[in-house]
Image (cartoon, rainbow, N blue to C red):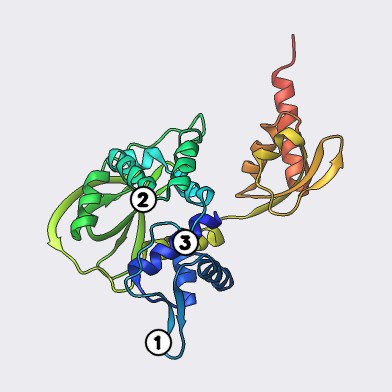
Amino acid sequence: MRAERLLRLLLHLQTRGQATVDQLSQALDVSPRTIQRDLEVLSVSGVPVYSIRGRGGGWALLPGYRTRLTGLTPSEVMSVFVGATAHVLADLGLDASSEQAVSKLIAALPENTRREAEYARQRVLIDHAGWDDRRETPRWLDLCREAVWKEHHLNITYGDGTEPFPVAPLGLVAKARTWYLVAARTDGRLRTYRLSRVTSAELTGDAFIRPAGFDLATYWAQSQREFQASRPSYPIVLKVRDHAVRRFRPIQPMIPAGDDWWIVHADLENAHEAQAAVLAQAGAAQAIAPPELIALVHEAAERIAAAHDQP
């Protein structure tokens, strides 16, 4: 991921000009200290990045500098190319354009880097979807994309609502296999709408002025942090078989418990979700805490056993 971040940092400075470490930190969603180290790496690799001190200062590239990606190694460049998410590009009708863009980027590389990049690209593909993923059909995606591009208002009906309301569409986000619309309400508040819950949408043709300083990546990162902070929390402790650990998301370092068992600390939304998660492992996960979860699993296991008694 560091190579991708370096390239994003370089292109951010190239396209948006001078920026402070704090601004770059927010744009790339990393710490200021990480940005400082990355700027040093770019400088050492030959990228003409320099600091401007004093009020209104920051970091910038020498005027007229345009990268040809020569400051990055073949493996670093390919870490960007290999991670392309095909279904997102296909939803947007950009899959063919993306292929052309990648070809042009590879053609711009030095000869030795180009050979290694093309070699790896033909041999590594990252598919972010699971086998049982069911991608939502983004019914209003084309209309929302048009509104975002043209900066025109949309009238939408959302969820169980019956009355349409106007929004100023600012951006589209694909998270996993689900599309979201980021838009401003008439009172200026920013909201995120899941496209699968939009029941109607109409392009009004009325233009709006995009909020000054709005950055889609920064907004999304902040909204994700707020969502995680507000979601229900139910901490649990489990004893889990080695092959079942991947079914949970440990929030602390795991502790070996012998014979391919691990002590796992996880955080789910509620007791019933935790009960279902433990039972789904068919004995490969054992509840240790809290006591409420142990009782729920025990009761459910007894009911299951009773329902499967042989006559």
Q: How far apart are marks 2 and 1 (CA)?
A: 35 Å
On screen, residue 270 versus residue 177, left or right, reads right
Extreme residue in the left direction: 205
Q: Going 38% across and 38% down the picture, which residue do you hit? A: 87
Which percent across, then down, holds residue 212?
29, 74
Label 1: few (<14), some or many (≥20) within 10 Å? few
**Residue highlighted by disc 1:** 56
Toward the right, the furthest residue is: 258
Tag shown at residue 221: 3
- When asked about the image quadrant of residue 305, the answer is top right
Query: Is residue 67 toward the left or the right of residue 274 in the image?
Result: left
Q: Quadrant of residue 49?
A: bottom left
Q: Position of residue 82 (x, y in %)?
A: 47, 42
Q: Which amino acid does label 3 sit on?
A: Ala
Could one spot residue 223 in this view of the protein? no
Q: Which mark is residue 108?
A: 2
- Give the residue drawn at x 47%, y 81%: 51
Residue in view at x 40 percent, y 44 percent: 178
The residue under label 2 is which amino acid type?
Ala
